[in-house]
Amino acid sequence: MITVQNLTKKYGKQTVLNIENLEIPTGQSFGLVGNNGAGKTTFFSLLLDLIQPTSGHIENNGAQVNTSEEWKPITSSFIDETFLIGYLTPEEYFYFIGDLRGQNKADVDALLSQFEDFFHGEILGQKKYLRDLSKGNQKKAGIVASFIGNPKVVILDEPFANLDPTTQIRLKGIIKDLAAKDNVTVLVSSHDLIHVTEVCERIVVLNKGEMVKDIKTSTETLKELETFFAG
Amino acid sequence: MFKQFASLQWKSFFRSANFGKSLAVKILMGFFAVYMLVVLAGSGAGMYFILRKAVPDQSPMWTLSQYLIYWVLIELFLRYFMQKLPVMDIKPFLTTPVKKSSIAHYILGRSAASVYNLLSLFFFVPFCIVLWFQGYPGLNVLLWLVAIVAIVLSINYLNLLINKSDKALIAIGIVIVTSYALDYFGIFSIKDVFGPLFHALYAFPITVLVPLALAVFIYYINYKFLHDKIYLDSTLKPKKVKANTSDLAWTKRFGDLGTFLQLDLKMIWRNKRTKSQVWISLLFVFYGLIFYTQEIYASMMPMKAFLGVFMTGIFLSNFGQFIPAWDSSYYSMMMSQNIPLRKYLESKALLISVSVVFMFLLTIPYVYFGWEALAINFGCALYNLGVNIPVILYFGSFNKKRIELDQSPFGNMQGTSANQFLIMVPVLIVPILIFTLFYYLVSLQVAVIVLCVLGLVGLALRNTLLNKVTEQYRKKKYGMIAGFKEKNS
């Protein structure tokens, strides 16, 4: 359960995020859409305590994120390529994250074996450092790394961008599987309305930092979103 | 077209993130630059008199000509490290309707105006002015200067050609060493062969055409080469290194620390800048030779304290001052993970401690210059271990500048802020002051013991100190994350 209360983030006089109240129950797959500058990444950064809120707070499973660190073991995320360590090979990176999350090599290997399809033979055993992989392959590695250590909350910022069509389809399957588990909350942001309506039970639209729509996904949702963004 | 290119160049210089920031660093760097230029110009102007005094029976021009071949070789050697052709800047132009020939001319023309070319001018122009005042014929001197400029440009363009292979570097290195050896042992005089050739540039003004033709020729080869290779998959593609995986299983013995220790070791070995820090640090072991071998310093104990702190702590300051900026490119990931910050810092501390001990062991042979050297180095090493490590980690929490790990280390000011200069005070100056004070007030033995005791106290309090440092890193977290995100700073 993630609770947001009176959360604002201002840079100077400009308010970039203002969410009065938002509750994301445990196990929900939550989609965040909005144009550039809507505040999606700001919200995720606040959720991960990478920036400080101007006012208000976020609670993640009972721990207030900017005062406690209790939420860290159960939360994992992939925001962008800066989450990768360029001079490691993908394997080394996975084991490193595993180490941080209390998983030994065998645990990590077992998890990775489930993603062989997703990797499409381009990640493991390539003798390449992460910094030398293509953007898409870097993203694949980062996304899978965020599944290590049975996290209860998974945060993915724009996971579909830069991926090839096959991988996008596979990723949708993976996120759906993950969300189907009762106790895993998945938060996804995307510019692709079709993908996000397909994988998320609930979609929130941000516009200039404000929550303007909160929709329970149904067959009409895509239409509704398209009308909204068409302006 | 060239005008537009030039204005782009101008903008990239003045709009670089570096430019607006940290005035203190800029002023200091500017100060060093001016100092260097003044020294160069001064030695250029003074060279005439120095040479006349050193070799009274020959014209200074003749003497200088004999050494010009070494200047050419050494400059080629040094430039290999310093200067690279900035081909990556071409990328944005590839899809614009700009002719490939203009792009190639622009890139090459730009390198002609590089700082390294100007440096030699700062030496040769004052030299020529002095010559002229000394009654050397104006035309000859002027054309000689032109010839020198042409040689500088030839070196410049030759370097761009050979910069792609390490073999060329090794070859030049061997040529320098062998020709000097041949000269030195009087087997065969390279100087006598090339001296008259270079002197001819002065004696017969018409020969200026030779270096000019050479410069144009090498420029043309470069141009040809670039023009044919402006494609994404050839020249412009950055080299990829094959990864060698190693699991460094022995680090597991350090328990939780092992995870970070492993990461740190990989970081150091797999990135240019950190790797060169290690080599540079190792080379500084020889720094002591400069001082220990000279009579004047034999009784200057504070100087020896400086050497002790410096030599055993060179890696400590070179590597330590940029903690945690080394991890800047993925710092936000680290902060969102369940990272025991304490372990992260402990791993860095352990790494630096090992380096201090190792550097101390390497300095043991200096005992040849007297037992004081060994005693002082020992005291300084202990002080570095106990006091300087927590100090440098503490100052690390003020680092907010991103470091791009895979960029060349030479002349790389990335990550540098006023902090890096301030840090010298506690790390280097304080121990020297303490030592000097006790040395003059009491005795050498007491001064060394005081350093040792301070180091031991620091070691005993290591836990408490590291807790304080960890607390500090927590507090500064948001500023660091924001700072490390800014590229090109």
Image (cartoon, rainbow, N blue to C red):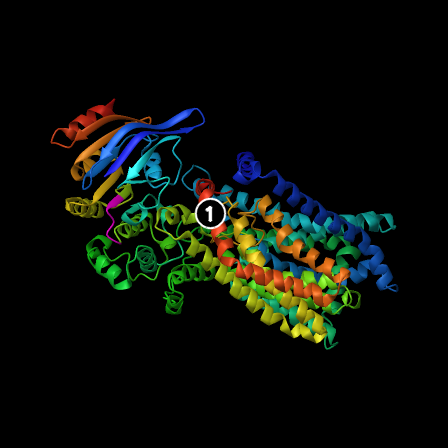
Element assignment for label 1: helix
**Residue occupying the point 27% across, 28% down:** A21
Specify the quadrant of the image occupied by residue B258. Answer: bottom left
Q: Pinpoint residue A65: horizontal percent, then vertical percent.
A: 34, 40
Task: Tell me, yes or no, whether the highlighted magenta stretch contains residue B99.
Answer: no
In the visual, does A14 lie left or right of B465? left
> Closer to the camera, B7 or A116?
A116
Q: Pinpoint residue B453: horizontal percent, then vertical percent.
A: 62, 63
**Residue occupying the point 40% across, 30% down:** A54
> Closer to the camera, B19 or B41?
B19
Query: Amino acid type of disc 1?
Result: Glu
> Closer to the camera, A230 or B476?
B476
Q: Kindly give the residue lying farthest to the top in the view shown.
A: A231
Q: Report whether residue B220 is seen.
A: yes
Mark 1 lies on residue = B471
Q: Report whether residue B313 is seen.
A: no
In the visual, does B403 lie left or right of B159? left
Task: Tell me, yes or no, whether the highlighted magenta stretch contains residue A152.
Answer: yes
Q: Is residue B464 above or below residue B179?
A: above
Q: Is residue B488 above or below residue B265?
A: above
Q: Pinpoint residue B328: horizontal percent, then vertical percent.
A: 45, 48
Q: Kindly give the residue lying farthest to the left in the view shown.
A: A219
Specify the quadrant of the image occupied by residue B28. Answer: top right
**Residue occupying the point 83% across, 51% down:** B131
- The subunit letter for the residue under badge 1 reads B
Q: Pinpoint residue B5: horizontal percent, then vertical percent.
A: 53, 37
The secondary structure that dominates the magenta segment is loop
Mark 1 neighbour density, 10 Å: few (under 14) some (14–19) many (20 or more) = some
Question: What is the magenta range?
Answer: A149-154
**Residue occupying the point 61% across, 67% down:** B173
